[in-house]
Image (tube, rainbow, N blue to C red):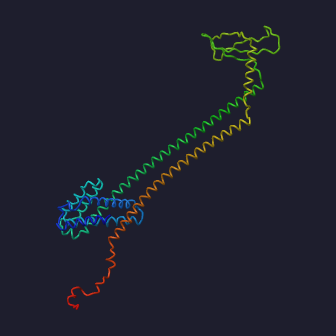
Amino acid sequence: MVFVVFLCLAASAGTVAASSHLRSNANMQPEKVAATLMNVQNEWKAQAHVFAQCAGRELSVCKEAPEAFQHSCVKVVSTVVLSSGGSPDDSSEYMTDVCSQKILSAWHRSKCNSVGTAILNKMSGNPVENRQNYFLHAKHACTDLWTEFVDEQKKIRDLEAEADKKEAAEEAVEDTKIAQHRAQDIAEKKVQIETDNQADAISKAAQTETAAAEQHSPQKSELTVPVKATPGQEEVEIVIAPAPEKKTASSKDAPAAAVKPAQKATSDIALLQMTSPADELAKEMTHDLEINFQKIAPFGKEDTAKELQDHASKTQDTLVDAVENAEVAEIKRAVFRALTRLRAATIKEFDTIARLETQAIDAYNDAHHFRAENPLAHLHEDEAPVSSDKLKSFH
């Protein structure tokens, strides 16, 4: 690519040499030069990017990048200086024309202006001195350009590193929140399970105690029935005593319905008289209580304990499986993100190596010429010069 720029600028230089100045920029084909210079700027940007990433690392690519930039940049700047005949005004006019082409983007136009500024800053007011020391001026200008490109790439690298840190911090905060929510959910589930188990145990223990008490006293001596009070009266409780079995009923032996006041009663209580048979109501309610108590499992029953143990085991297995699935999902996410970034970095490095290798090949081709290093022995070199032929007679 640099070789193409050199040929393009060299062809333009022939026209300038004939007229000794750059008054006819149309013959210099500025649009074509701008397109070629844009590609060269892309290569310079890639070389500066590689060098900016080499902080603290000793790699061959890190040493080759500035050398390749200096080699191509010196060629471009030298050609511009020589084509202008060493005149700063002609160089400024030509670079202004090239940098104003529509094919250039904003960034390429800015860097093109930087190239023109670097060339003019290193040129003196004497055209003869500029032509004689063009190579030294080109090296100094390229040093400034290299510093500008590298500083720009370092700023971009710092911005990318800051963005990566910010993204990593946000991911860490999000992961922490997710872990806290998961831990909170697990703790709430454990508390709920323990509460349910305790409630079940307390309920079964109460039922067992009630059943045991019912077995020792199958019938109640008396039954207390709360009765709502009428307006203006306090709430009262009616105590009903069961009738004795197989005894002659008489007005003196039959238990009467006694009324006792509630604990909270502080005023006068109206006594109520039961009109329904007390013994029938007591027998019916006692029978219902016995049937209900028989349905409750005794405390300490093996089947109930086994059922509770199985339920606890299944619940714990579910919690462990949920935690394991969460860990696997997090590991997969982290590995996938890491491999994606590694892939992008690897592709970028291979692209840079490919560009640098092709530049090295072009540089070697520019510096070495086979016929110059391996001269050919022509047959006519063994003969006498042509001028001596007229001194010989062929008949």
Q: Residue furthest front?
A: 395
Residue 73 lies, with reference to residue 286, above or below; the image says: below
- Find residue 260 and report its image quarter: top right
- Taking the view exactly as shown, the residue that stands out farthest to the top is 251
* Quadrant including the N terminus: bottom left
Residue at horizontal 29 percent and vertical 53 percent from the top: 105
State left or right for residue 152 relative to residue 244. left
In the rendered view, tell whether residue 283 sits above or below residue 176.
Answer: above
| Left/right of residue 363 with respect to residue 282 in the rendered view | left
Q: Is residue 39 left or right of residue 247?
A: left
On the image, which quarter does residue 238 sit in? top right
| Residue closest to the eye, 75 or 242 | 75
Q: Position of residue 205 (x, y in %)?
A: 70, 31
Residue at 75% across, 25% down: 214
At x 18%, y 69%, the residue is 128
How many numbered circles does the render carry? Answer: 0
Residue 329 spot, x, y in % from top left = 54, 47
Residue nearer the viewer, 338 or 383: 383
Residue closer to the observer: 287 or 8: 8
Residue 27, horizontal then vertical, whole percent: 20, 62
In the displayed structure, 132 sits above or below 264; it is below
Q: Is residue 192 left or right of residue 288?
A: left
- Residue 302 in the image, given as x and y percentages of width and height: 74, 37
Image quarter in which the C terminus is found: bottom left
